[in-house]
Image (spheres, rainbow, N blue to C red):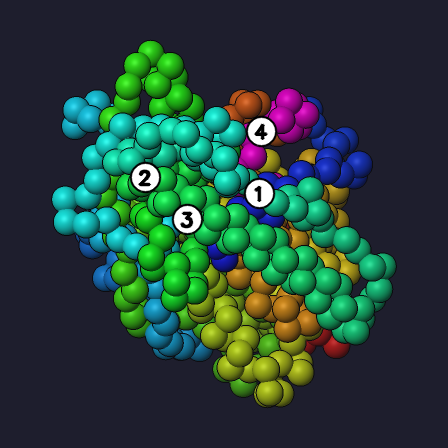
Amino acid sequence: MMDRRKALALLGGTAIGLPLVSAGGAQAAGRVGRALTPVARRDVGRLRRHLSSLHAAAVAHGGDRAAGTAGYDASARYVEKVLRRTAFRVERQYFTYETLVEVRNVVEQVPAGSRDIRSAPAVGVSLSPAGGHTGELVVPDDAYGDAESSWEGRDVAGRIALLKLRHPGASRMKRERTGCHGDRGKAERLVVERRAGERLARDFEETIRRQLSLAGAAGILAVVYDSGFQLAVGIQLGEPSDRALIPATCTVLEDADHLRREMSSGAVELHVELEVERREIETFNLLAEMPGSDSTHICGAHLDSVRGGPGMSDNGSGSAVLLETALKQAADRRTPWKFCWWGGEEDGMKGSFHFVDGIRESADFDRLEAYLNLDMVASPNYVVSVYGDDGLERLFTDHFRSVGQPWITGPVDTFSDHLPFREAGITVAGVDTVGGAVLRLKTEEEAALFGGTAGELYDPQYHKAGDDLSNISWEAIAICVAAGDAACRTVAARPGARA
């Protein structure tokens, strides 16, 4: 699941990602933590094999499965090998794109080694000089540093500033439903959402520019932002003049609070060294469908991980569930489903956008009725969360109701590969285990429904090197693979659904 597309995705996810407990799901709370059924145990056994193979691909190739890497290629070869034992026709769809890669990303207290500060360097501003900057940490009186008076009368030249991010308009970030149905209503609703997002993006960027300009004018060398969240917010500026702004990065709330506590006891020195560069990535999607079929439905999951981690929960879990779901459909030569493993999701849903752009003017697009997404379906401190448009989510919720499985309803957000389909007017739905808001902490109500620990992240190893096989909830993934299979079988059984 991608961090952002990019700063706004995190802001929007926090503001709108407040799942509601479904009245239909709450009835089964007492069954949380139940033993797996024989069918679920068999599913988990196969899912373990799939995930172990994806994990081995990461370990053997530098520790991750990011798009354009040998780890990604090895992951794809495993999926292809399994599918080619069936009647599915499997093809690679190649594409290229530019992405940003961190060349230098060091934020640490001095003396070296006293504490490394988690950091997401800002894009589009100046780079740190060779050797970086070292300076005493300072904060403005107003905490944000975006007022003309923020640094007035203070000698802060040669220092490094700790600033809070100001999130203008966050209270406006709500998904407002028009109540319309059909293509026209869906498109109008999306225009409203995108316009709201663009306004928020402009406000956010202008505030960042003002903060960095005022800090630079005061002689500050670099800025470390406090995201206010458990993960860093990505900052990306795009105007040519932004290259003159001082280097900046964003850290997490926990590390920012640590620095403030240290400052209350005395001077704190930081060493900051930041550099981000653009690179061209060549990668591919994997597409599987029955020969001669005219698929009307697509189920997809992104196969790539972030750089620097094996990506078992995000999104080896979704890739494995998708593979097992496809295998369960493999005996049906007339299945209406196409199964797609996307590349480049972590860099902005590159693969799914490429696919949708490529079919927009074709008969394949005209036939396409719906898209289902599988992303982060095995988080260790999980919830079972469903989202969707126009009632499509009932493919999951009808199944959950029939087996007494609780669920919550999450937002149809902009974090994952359903986005390009939805923007193209295709009805979408999905299931995940993070409530559509990976930054949120689990609530007491959710812990009562699903077990786990309230007050902690759903997935504490999200986008980290620790997202390995130990970061998987086998109970959660068993729930999600059963839901995916039920959704596919429901569609396949409808009159006229055969490809």
Q: Say left or right for 353 vs 99.
A: right
Residue situated in front as seen by the camera: 489 or 297:
297
Residue situated in front as seen by the camera: 190 or 320:
190
At label 3, counting other C-alpha atoms closer than 10 Å, the crowd grade (few under 14, some 14-19, many 20 or more) is some
Q: Which residue is drawn at 52% across and 48% down?
A: 207
- Residue 251: give x, y in percent of width and height: 39, 37
State whether residue 402 appears in this view.
yes
| First-in-chain label (4 vs 1) | 1
**Is residue 317 part of the magenta span, yes or no?**
no
376 to 443, vertically: above or below: below
- Residue 186: give x, y in percent of width and height: 75, 67
What's the magenta region? 435-449
Gap in Å between the C-alphas at discs 2 and 1? 22 Å
Gap in Å between the C-alphas at discs 3 and 4? 38 Å
What residue is disc 1 on?
Answer: 167
Nearest to the eye among marks 3 and 4: give it. Answer: 3
Q: Residue furthest front?
A: 153
Q: In which quarter of the image is residue 356?
A: bottom right
**Is residue 439 part of the magenta span, yes or no?**
yes
- Residue 259: give x, y in percent of width and height: 36, 24
Quarter that holds the C terminus = bottom right
**In the image, what residue type sits under mark 1?**
His
Q: Which residue is drawn at 44% across and 33% down?
A: 152
Mark 3–mark 4 CB contact (< 8 Å): no
Q: Residue 442 carries which label?
A: 4
What residue is disc 2 on?
Answer: 220
Nearest to the eye among marks 4 and 1: give it. Answer: 1
Q: Say left or right for 401 vs 461.
A: right
What residue is disc 3 on?
Answer: 213
